Image (cartoon, helix red, strand yellow):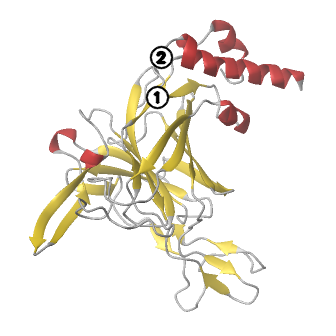
Amino acid sequence: MLARVFLLSAFCAAVLWATAACRSPVDRVFALPLVRPPVEAEWEAAVPLRVQAAGGRTTRANEASVDADTVHKATASCHHGTQAPPVDLEVRAFYTPERVYLRLTWSDPTLHRGPGWIWDGSSWRRGPSGQDGVAILWGAGAEGFTCARACHLADFRMAGVRAFADYRMSTPEAWGRLDLWEWKAGWGGLAGVADDLSLGPEGRGPDVPGERFMENRAPDADGPLLAPDPEPGAEAPAFVDRASPSGRTEVEAEGRWVAGRWIVTFSRDLRGTDPGDVVLEPGAVYPVGIALLDGVSEDHTAVAEPVRIWLVPRKRLLPEVGTAGPGL
């Protein structure tokens, strides 16, 4: 026990030193190096970057009214469209010689796992259709990167006193395609599954073409196709994962909804496998855009400014901490 306390204390010292003694900016996430995947105690000790996601629509009551200067509800082109209060979000990160790990924690009092299934004691019944989710857009190499610039109005028109706008997610031509990681609570299992996508001038698309998630519904019965044994409280996911082992599965993520908060942890190899995957190097700083879904499909909330993730090089840590801290 004493050894564990000492190691955790040394780890905390590394965190504090990286964020204070080296006089680095505090407007970023400090991803400390480890030699193996982070354990829960290290996640709890990590200093988070606290930001807010705003400007979208949620499933909470009386939050979807639209401001007078808004043209299309609450997309990233406006991000000032509704009266929904901002969502508190915390971002933490680590990396090993092989992988990067990102953890996002945000408040969400309403759980939405999509149209999944619950056994009520006599039959399977469907849950509500909305899904909670989170997306991370990597802006490496995109000059002037922000989430707002990644959502363009395709058309704007007036009809009397009413304004209409069509929009789609797309990047400026100069940016090319950007790496996009997305997780939804109803994909592939009750912990959710991540999908490896990209965003380019022509819009959003998967790294490997094709539909990945199939609705979990038996073709000739009012119930799930894949489900555990029926017993009170048993649950089955909304969508099952049918991806091949490569191409769409290198980004991993799982989520936990605890006491009105989502805790979602992503991981991926530092270099990825697809030519469009962002390559991550120790010592570099990477801007990312973060968007949250609260039981809705498109009108997400988003962090207004890019979140910067710094893969802190080992040489920036105190030598005595680097040899004593757990995993350092």
**Relative to residue 298, is residue 187 drawn left or right?**
right
Q: Circle 2 sits in a helix, a strand or a loop, which is it?
A: loop
Q: Callout 1: few (<14), some (14-19), or many (20+) C-alpha neighbours within 10 Å?
A: many
x, y percent for residue 185 = 55, 62
Q: Is residue 123 above or below residue 268?
A: below
The vertical placement of 145 against 250, above or below, is above
Residue drawn 63% across and 30% down? 46
Name the mark on residue 185. Answer: none
Q: Which residue is rendered at x = 69% and y = 88% of the image?
A: 123
Outermost residue, bottom direction? 220
Name of the residue lying farthest toward the right: 1
What SS does tag 1 mark?
A: strand
Real-space CA distance between mark 1 and mark 2, rounded to the nearest whole angstrom: 9 Å
* Residue 57 visible in the snapshot: yes
Q: Name the residue under label 2.
A: 24
Q: Nearer the viewer, residue 227 or 136?
A: 136
In the image, 155 versus 125, the foreground residue is 155
* Left or right of residue 35: residue 165: left
Q: Horizontally, is 101 left or right of 244 in the view?
A: right
Badge 1 is on which residue?
A: 28
Q: What residue type is labelled 1?
A: Arg
